[in-house]
Amino acid sequence: MNKLTIREMLVRGEKARKQALFPLLSEMGLIPGQGQAKILYRLLLNDRVTQKDLADQCRIDTAAMSRNIDKLEGLGLLVRESNPDCRRSFLICLTKKGYAEAKQIKKVFEQFEDIVSEGIAPEEIEVFYRVMEHMCTNLERFNAAESQT
């Protein structure tokens, strides 16, 4: 197998993922590709977290996270609350409306998982997951080394 094919398959998969999710997320008023759905989903799993922790969980840089939080707060989906453990930071929390939206996003993500894994044996999905995890670790290690030079 040609290694160029790995890059091409990753690009093809990302394009197909965006095409599948774009209309579903757009209907909800979210801007696909900016991480807003991922932020709401993460808060559904673990609400009341600091902006930094949320950025780490979502793998979004702090500047983009700040813009997204502003946007989602403006839509009434989340709020910033005082952090009793640190006066200089806030806890990011879902509103009632945000919780309902996050539950819808969870359904969309589950539907997406069903679509992409259709006809693939669970053992093959597990192998795919391990290979992707290894590739991501390789890329993260490379990026960290590059940023130090």
Image: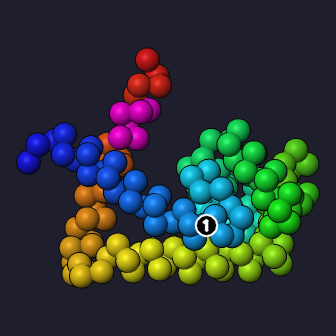
Determine the residue positioned at 84% across, 53% down.
Answer: 90
Compare residues 96 and 48 and report the one nearer the observer.
96
Q: Is residue 11 left or right of residue 31?
A: left
**Quadrant housing the C terminus:** top left
Q: Which stretch appears magenta?
A: 139-144
Q: Is residue 48 left or right of residue 62?
A: right
Circle 1 crowding by C-alpha within 10 Å: few under 14, some 14–19, many from 20: some
Determine the residue positioned at 51% across, 66% down.
Answer: 21
The quadrant holding residue 75 is bottom right
Determine the residue positioned at 60% across, 47% down.
Answer: 60
Determine the residue positioned at 46% across, 66% down.
Answer: 20
Outermost residue on the top side: it is: 149
Q: Is residue 111 above or below residue 26?
A: below
Q: Is residue 16 above or below residue 99?
A: above
Q: Is residue 90 left or right of residue 131?
A: right
Residue 79 seen in the current view: yes
Query: Overall secondary structure of the magenta stretch?
Result: helix
